[in-house]
Image (cartoon, helix red, strand yellow):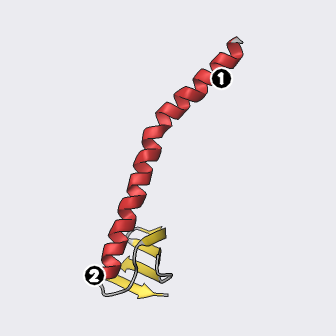
Amino acid sequence: MAIARRIALGTTVVAVLTAPFSIAAQEDVEKVKKDLFAVITLRGNPCGAVISFERLGENDYNAICQTGDRYHIFVSSEDRVGVEKY
């Protein structure tokens, strides 16, 4: 019984300690989706909503929109935001 309690307690401690990080990570994901959506639509492209994305590098993303459209969003060497449909 003592070992089972220790395992249960250890599992609970790990869950409590990691929960804030997973919540923060999910909030970051939602923020990135909203930011990418804003950039895509401000450049006059159809989207609906960004449903998923892949980070390729700093300020470099591929995004898939609710409409099925796929975009590459990046910052060029001239510090301009680029949106390319692929």
Total labels: the figure holds 2
Circle 2 crowding by C-alpha within 10 Å: few under 14, some 14–19, many from 20 = few
Whether residue 68 sits left or right of residue 83 in the image: it is right
Judging from the image, what secondary structure is the residue with disc 1 in? helix
Q: Secondary structure at mark 2?
A: helix
Q: In this image, 15 relative to 37: left or right?
A: right
> In x, y percent, where is residue 60?
42, 73
Which picture quadrant has residue 82?
A: bottom left
Relative height, residue 17 to residue 39 (above, below)? above
**Between marks 2 and 1, how big is the CA–CA gap?**
52 Å
Q: Is residue 1 above or below residue 79?
A: above
User: Which three-letter amino acid code belongs to the residue tagged 2?
Assistant: Leu
Which residue matches tag 1?
7
Residue type, numbered disc 1: Ile
**Along the viewing direction, whichever of 63 and 68 lies nearer the viewer:** 68
In this picture, residue 50 sits left or right of residue 78 = right
Give the residue at x 47% y 69%. 51
Determine which residue is flagged by label 2: 42
Residue 65, how many percent across, how many down? 46, 77
